[in-house]
Image (cartoon, helix red, strand yellow):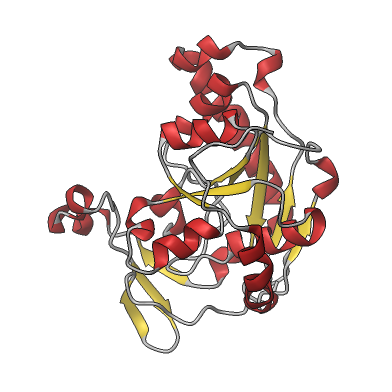
Amino acid sequence: MSVTRVGSARDPTFLRAVRPILERFASYFRPEVRGFDRLPKRGPFLVVGNHSGGQMPPDLPVLLTAWWRERGEDEPVYALFHSFFLGLPGLGPVMARAGAVEAGPAEAEAILRGGGILIDYPGGDYEVFRPWWERNRIKFGDRVGFVRLALRTQVPIVPAVSVGAHETVIVLARGERLAKLLGFDQMFRIKVMPLVLGPPFGVVPGGIPTWPLPAKITVELCEPIDWSSRYGPEAADDDVIVRNCYKELTDTMQAALNRLAAERRLPILG
């Protein structure tokens, strides 16, 4: 497997050292991750998930800790992160050692062309701060860059659908207008300034951490979708094909989320 400069900071030894800490954090949510038998045996492939949980989204730690148990820390798994988080002093280098890569088309393509596995939450801040009443909805905000990426690199997409993570915090509003008014979209590429409800402070702006509620989180890795059997890399520039692929994937993920949500008897308790 070829090695790319992008993602070279990833350190499996470091992951083995910090895994017990992340395992303890993930265990708070009574995690269940299904479908590892559906994964391709090796990369490259793209894992696309619905992003949930507000300021401290637990969906990625739940998925990664289960992944490391099942397939080991040496497998070249990376995750895309907003440049704001990777730029935080002291935090960015640590995240890079865990496999974090800045979210950008060139970086993402380099990982996949190097044979890696890439986890992407296309909805980003728009989805992770969707209101409570939309907690069981796929909300990517019409962001189609990941579709173009999969078509251009001819890699399959594995949908990773989670339920419960958006019951760990109660989001009251995204605050898109406020973020624009404050200029956050220009200064930090942050397009939301949410209002959330959670202990111990009650109702607070989204920048203030709250203690997550102990909701049970279930993640299902669905059957891979491989558009390369139908389209060549040039399809990445065809807006009609891209929109059709986007709809196919989001419809597939919404159907899985509906099924997972139907298994839950009560919010938070699961």
| Vertical order, 98 against 221 (above or below) | below
Q: Position of residue 156 (x, y in %)?
A: 67, 29
Residue 180 visible to the viewer: yes
- Image point (18%, 48%), residue name: 186
Q: Which of 168 and 131 is in front in this view?
A: 168
| Vertical order, 25 against 229 (above or below) | below
In this rendering, would 86 be left or right of 154? left
Q: Where is residue 79 in the image (x, y as percent from the top left)?
A: 54, 49
- Image point (81%, 38%), residue name: 41
Q: Quadrant of the N terminus?
A: top right
Q: Nearer the viewer, residue 183 or 88?
A: 88
Residue 164 visible to the viewer: no
Q: In which quarter of the image is residue 250?
A: top right
| Vertical order, 140 against 267 (above or below) | above
- Image point (32%, 78%), residue name: 204
| Vertical order, 22 against 233 (above or below) | below
In this rendering, would 49 be left or right of 133? right
Q: Which of 65 and 197 is in front in this view?
A: 65
Q: Where is residue 255 in the image (x, y as percent from the top left)?
A: 68, 42
Q: Position of residue 96 (x, y in %)?
A: 48, 56
- Residue lying at the far right in this picture: please name it: 37
Q: In which quarter of the image is residue 203?
A: bottom left
Q: Which of 267 and 159 is in front in this view?
A: 159
Q: Quadrant of the C terminus?
A: bottom right
